[in-house]
Each structure stands twice: as structure tokens, then as C-alpha cells.
């Protein structure tokens, strides 16, 4: 992978309850670079509002939220 390429990291937090998914997201975020995407898989019903609050606090962008049994949230890192 070249220096300017972005990565998508998958974070599997299924079965973990709050604050597990957000903690896992924060760990992945610390390793990410601007432009990377983090795909969070979670079953905790509170993950959507938690990720929205996290994105607002950190200044990052939610790309998509899928309403599936295993909720999938994709976050784009736009700020470090």
C-alpha cells in the first residue's frame, strides 16, 4: 500500500456491551490516519447514538449506519 492510500479497518465488537464498542472504536481510531475508514460491527443497541456522540466530539464523519442485526457503522477519520 502506498503512502497516500487509505485503509478500512474492521472492528468486531459483536456481543460486547457499552462501553465496549466505543472503546474498541477509540483504539482503532488511535491507529488510523486521516482518510481511513473504520467499520464497527456491534450488537449493542446503544451503539448508534454512542458513535454519533463520539463523532461529534472528535470531529470525525459517520459514512453510514446499517440497521442489521449486527449493526454496522462506518466512520471516516477526518481529524486527528
Image (tube, rainbow, N blue to C red):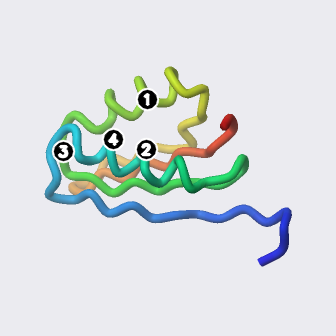
Mark 4–mark 1 CB contact (< 8 Å): yes
Q: Give the residue pinned by disc 3.
A: 44
How far apart are the two marked residues, 3 and 1, measured between alpha carbons?
Answer: 15 Å
Secondary element at tag 3: loop
How far apart are the two marked residues, 3 and 4, measured between alpha carbons?
Answer: 10 Å
Label 1 Cα crowd, 10 Å radius (few <14 / some 14-19 / many 20+)? some
Which mark lies nearer to you, 3 or 1?
A: 1
Question: Residue 29, image x and y in percent?
Answer: 52, 48
x 50%, y 21%: residue? 57
x 30%, y 51%: residue? 71
Label 2 Cα crowd, 10 Å radius (few <14 / some 14-19 / many 20+)? few
Q: Give the residue pinned by disc 4.
A: 22
* Quarter of the figure that contains the C terminus: top right
Q: Give the residue pinned by disc 2.
A: 26
Q: Give the residue pinned by disc 1.
A: 54
For marks 3 and 4 on the same chain, the one whose residue lies earlier in the sequence:
4
* Quarter of the figure that contains the N terminus: bottom right
Secondary element at tag 4: helix
Amino acid at each position: 500500500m502506498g503512502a497516500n492510500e487509505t485503509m478500512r479497518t474492521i472492528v468486531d465488537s459483536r456481543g460486547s456491551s457499552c462501553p465496549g464498542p466505543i472503546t474498541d472504536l477509540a483504539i482503532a481510531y488511535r491507529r488510523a490516519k486521516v482518510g481511513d475508514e473504520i467499520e464497527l460491527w456491534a450488537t449493542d443497541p446503544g451503539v448508534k447514538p454512542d458513535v454519533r456522540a463520539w463523532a461529534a466530539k472528535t470531529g470525525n464523519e459517520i459514512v453510514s449506519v446499517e440497521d442489521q442485526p449486527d449493526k454496522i457503522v462506518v466512520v471516516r477519520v477526518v481529524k486527528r
